[in-house]
Each structure stands twice: as C-alpha cells, then as structure tokens.
Amino acid sequence: MELKSAIERCGRAKRILILKTNLLGDVLNFLPVANFFRESAPSARISWLVSKSGYPVVSELSGVDEIFLLEDSLLYNYRNLFRIAGWLREKQFDLLVTSYQEECFLIGALALLSRAPVRIGSNLRNRGWFFNIVAPKGEFKRRVEINGRIIRTLGGNPKDFVYLPGASAKGEAEFNAKLKRKFGLDENAGFCALHLFSQKPIKSWRLEYGPELIRRIQEELKLIPVLVGSEEEAKRFGDEQKKLGLLNLTGQINLLELYYLLKQAKLFIGIDSFPLQLTEFCGTKAIALFGSTVVSENLVPNAEPVKAEVECAPCWPAKVECDRGLKCWLELKPDRILESARRVLLNSGA
C-alpha cells in the first residue's frame, strides 16, 4: 500500500484499534499516538487492547471509546493466539496501530491475523512485514519520541499531542478542594512531590536516606515533602515519617489526581517510573534518579538526571536481582539530589 493512500484511509477510518499492552509508563508514552488518531479521525470509534497492568492509564487518562483487556501472561496469550485473532477479526477494525515496544512476534501476529486493512507499527528486528505502514525507530532513543515517529509518518507533530484527554479544569478544581479538605494541603502551598520506591528492590531508592532528604527539603528548599506511589514499602515509609512533616498520599489518589498534584508541584523528585513519565505531560520540573535503569530511554525533557556512576550500571532489565549490594543506589545520596534540586529551582525562578 502506498503511504499517501494509507494516510487517506487513516482519515476515513471508522473503527480503530490500539494495541499497546505494557506497564503504566509504557502505555502512557503511547497516549500521544491515541490522541493523534482521536483528532485526525474524530468520527471513528477508538478501542484499546491493553493488559491488566496498563489498564488504569487507558481507563483514567485517555479519551478512547472502549477498552479490551489482554492477559498479562505471554504464555496464555500465545496459547490463545488464534482465538484472540478470531475475536479481533469479528470486530472488523479497519485500522490497527501498535508500537515498537511490544513483544514483537505476538503483537505483530495479532496485527496481521486481525486482517485490518491498515496496520501501523515499527520495524523492530526486521519484522516490519506485519505492517503496511512502517514507522522506523530512527535516531530516537526515548520511548515517547520513538512512538512519535508514527505521528510524524502520518504528517503530524508529536509535541501537539502530549496531553491527557481525561483531565479538565472542573476535575482539577474538585481535586484541589479534596486536597485541602482531606489532606490539609493548599494548592498554593509550595511542595515537592516524591516517588522514591519501586516494587522491585533493584529499581528502588535507598530507604535509609529518606529521613535526611525529607528534613533537607523542608529546611533548605522550603518546600513541603509529599510522598506518592502505591508500593507497600512507600506506604510504610510514609506512615513512619509523618512526624518529620512528610505528607503521605501513597495509595490515596488515583492516576488523574496524581496528574493534578504533579501539575501544581514546585518540584518532583523520583525514580524512573510512571510518575516521572507523567511530569512530561504537565511540564513539572523534575529530578530523575537513575540507578539501575537506562537514562537515554527514560529521561523526560523537563527533568535533570542524577545518575549513578558505577561500572555495573545500568543493568535493568537484564538483571532482576542485584548481587553487588545495590551500590548504584548507594551513590545517590541526599547531597547529590539537593544540589541538583537547588539548581533546577533557581533556573526555573521558583
């Protein structure tokens, strides 16, 4: 299919399927592509096939018309490949789009077997024959930029589509009222949002550094520390450190409310995770802590990286457990983080 003809068919599409099934941050980074199709084909019915782990992003933050769930288990999905493909054919999608990050063969096979006449994806590992519109990875490394190649291929500018359809002025006002009523935090108060822990120890900042960081955020930056996240370790830490003046919001706000919170924060400090990726959508200044993960793939443009300089880092996802005492995270002490934070706040005029 010629590209010009394919682009014209994109604009005429009536039933569009987005195949994007990964974790929260990965799904969020594909949201601009969904926004692009929402605007370029306003009369189309847009569906999203997503895994259970990525479902909250689609349900709370996107503007799609319907959501279908795919199992998180690759083994289950492989065993049921033809059943899932048959179900896709019954839906009669006339356009299907996916990203380079998906497990390539499974998603590519589903795309091909869906028989959607227009299939858009990236040529990863020379398997572009699954798609009749191929958006190459090119020189980009960041996930959101690689996904943006799909938008560029179809004639759009990815920067125009970095927004959350689920957000509204009314929703933000309601959250601000809740923030003050339930948590005693005024929207005009200067605060620093923190997301420091992961469910995976190899991706989690050092718990023992936490009390010092909280004290110094208050004393040196003159900001209220506000902890977010849903990890059990974060909840325990948040409860234990209330005596230091930490406001613990872990597990108490949803993803859209997290967006409203980050939008109002003077600063965000956090590990490579969904909240860090979300700061790109609200433009909040951020300090990004990189221990075991790759900076080039995960850094957002509004963040300054604080990176571990050890020979074994980055190691994720090749390693899921550390045999070297997590020394990458030991390097990221409060001194380094505060030095970066002061510089970012000074440059932003805060």
Image (spheres, rainbow, N blue to C red):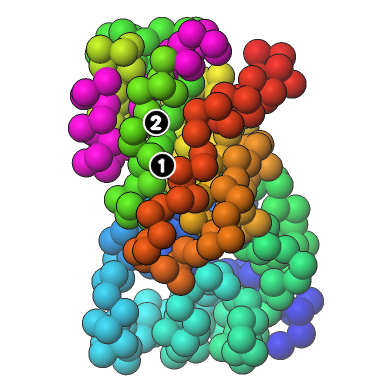
Q: Residues within 10 Å of mark 1 (few under 14, many from 20)?
A: many
Residue carrying label 1? 205
- Nearer to us in this view, 79 or 270: 270
> Residue visible at 74% across and 57% down?
156
310 shown above or below 50: above
Label 2: few (<14), some (14–19) or many (≥20) C-alpha neighbours in 10 Å: few
Q: Which mark is residue 172?
A: none
Where residue 273 sits in the image (x, y, percent)?
Answer: 45, 47
- State the count of labels: 2
Determine whether, in the image, residue 225 is placed left or right of residue 34: left
Q: Is residue 227 magenta?
A: yes
Q: Nearer the viewer, residue 221 or 23?
A: 221
Whether 342 is drawn above or below 156: the answer is: above
Q: Residue at x 76, y 79 (%)?
A: 3
Secondary structure, mark 1, is: loop
> Which residue does the numbered mark 2 point to in the structure image?
209
- Which span is picked out in magenta? 216-241
Q: Is residue 111 visible?
A: no
Q: CA distance from mark 1 to mark 2?
A: 8 Å
Amino acid type of the residue tagged 1 in the rendering: Trp
The secondary element bearing badge 2 is classed as: helix
Image quarter in which the C terminus is found? top right
Q: Nearer the viewer, residue 288 or 1?
A: 288
Question: Is residue 230 visible to the viewer in this orientation of the structure?
Answer: yes
State the residue at coordinates (46%, 33%): 259
Q: Is disc 1 in contact with disc 2, using a CB cutoff of under 8 Å?
A: yes
Q: Is residue 149 left or right of residue 281?
A: right
The percent position of residue 173, horizontal first and vertical second, equals 42, 17
In the figure, residue 55 lies in which quadrant? bottom left
| Residue 122 figure quarter | bottom right
